[in-house]
Amino acid sequence: MKNQYSLQLIPLLFIIVITTLIIKIYDLSTFRMIISILTLIASIVIFFMFFLMCFNWYTSYMIFNKNTFVSKVDKPRVFMFSILTPLLILTFYILNYYQSSNIFSYKWAEVNLWFDIVFCITFSSLFYTLCILSVFTLSKKFEKFYLPKVVKNLEIIYETYTSYYSLKQLNDIFDGLLEHNFLIFEDFDKQNIDKEKFIDLIISGKFPENPFLKLKMNNHQTFVLHEEFEKGFREFDLNSFWKFFRNKNDKASVDSIVESYRKCVKENIKQRNKIELIFKKIR
């Protein structure tokens, strides 16, 4: 990993040296002429790579009726480009239209020269960094290694909820699920550990790394439980609920739970009254 970062610093050192030599030996106009060609080529290559990816999504769907756009991976890619593209264009414009600095008087011409060098090094390095990020976003490494880390960090920042349940109410909810056999533990110590973990996470407004409570419920009952449970929260949807729980249907997902409930006869859901009773007792 350290060697990888060291290799990434070499082009930046190259930019510093070459920019300084060109402006010192020749002038700013010569540097601007060279950098305009290099940045234009780099921009065309990056936008062409992204165009090819978009063209692949489009042709796969229109011709073969196959959706190759994977939301989990490609949405973040598009999001990254929506940020990087204006930054690339802005940096390209600044580098190509920057005029020599006259901040200081003629007597301080050397200072003006070094100001130009520092300015050009800064924006050349920025442009290079933006190019590297753009190319990296299109790579397989982005979806395999870095994307999961980014998503996880964003979830911590943005996916928050607020619980209005007291400690006693959460205790009673957990005990109610145990009482009606919606939660079953063979190990009493494991039961206490999971109960404490459940209460601590809800009180602190955090999510577990993985779902850890297995409900003895089908999809219909799971939907009803969430419906009752979310009344004590702000912003605690079924996706949030599903980060804590799983049910006896191993293939269940948020979408399948919603779809199952939508198609069922609501009055015929087994043990619905027991689920509702758990929450009536605490209100």
Image (cartoon, grey):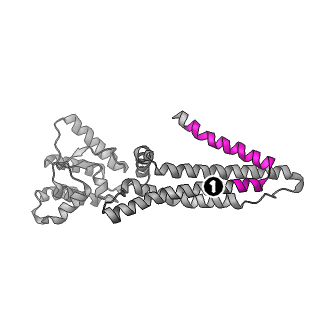
Identify the amino acid type marked 1: Thr
Q: Secondary structure at mark 1?
A: helix
Give the percent coordinates (x, y) of residue 22: 76, 48
Residue 44 on the magenta span? no
Give the percent coordinates (x, y) of residue 28: 77, 54
The answer to whether 190 is drawn above or below residue 27 in the figure is: above
Q: Which residues are magenta?
A: 5-34
The answer to whether 43 is drawn above or below residue 195 in the figure is: below
The answer to whether 259 is drawn above or below residue 218 in the figure is: below
Question: Which residue: 71% across, 42% down?
Answer: 17
Give the percent coordinates (x, y) of residue 90: 62, 61
Which residue corresponds to mark 1? 39
Residue nearest the viewer, comparing 159 with 262 = 262
Question: Which residue: 27% across, 52% down?
Answer: 242
Q: Is 24 placed left or right of 5 in the picture? A: right
Q: Residues within 10 Å of mark 1 (few under 14, many from 20)?
A: many
Q: Is 251 placed left or right of 95 in the picture? A: left
Residue 9 on the magenta span? yes
